[in-house]
Image: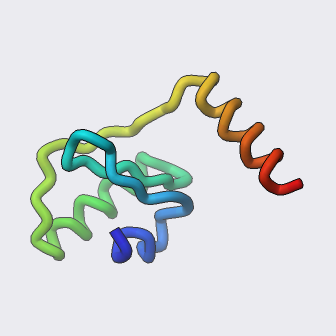
Amino acid sequence: LQQLKKLPFVTGAVRRISGTNGIRLVVEQANKAIPALLEWCRQEFVNVDSIEEYLPPFDDVFVELVNDETNSN
């Protein structure tokens, strides 16, 4: 996970998805980051079963924004 956080296209959190061996990471543009991530995985001998863009529901985004604003005050 630490190596993934250092990748130039990763702009936010890198988290394990509970109950799976999956990982979710935040990038600016998934259409550019996915090919770069797949290339990195190939070079690091990391097997990828699947990869997809995740767009969280608006309610989840709203709650996260409110939490960020509350924590910054």
Q: How far from the left and from the top, in percent, is residue 56?
A: 51, 31
Residue 63 vs residue 43, the one in the foreground: 63
Closest to the observer, 2 or 27: 2
Looking at the figure, which quarter contains the N terminus? bottom left
Residue 73 image position (x, y, % from top left): 89, 54
Task: Judge from the rendering whether residue 53 lies leftward or rightward of residue 41; answer left or right.
Answer: right
Residue 57 occupies quadrant: top right
Left or right position of 37 against 7: left
**39 on left or right of 34:** left
Farthest right residue in view: 73
Please identify the quarter of the rendering in which residue 66 is found.
top right
Q: How many marks?
A: 0
The residue that appears at 12% across and 46% down in the rendered structure is 49
In the image: residue 66, left or right of residue 15: right
Instruction: Give the answer, above or below, for where 15 lies relative to 57.
Output: below
In percent of width and height, residue 50 lies at 18, 42
Above or below, 66 against 14 in this view is: above
Position above or below: 54 against 70: above
Residue 10 on image: x %, y %: 48, 63
Q: Residue at x 66, y 39 (%)?
A: 64
* Vertical relation: 64 (above or below) 60: below
Q: According to the image, what is the colour scheme of the structure? A: rainbow
In the image, what residue occupies the spot 50% across and 58% down? Answer: 13
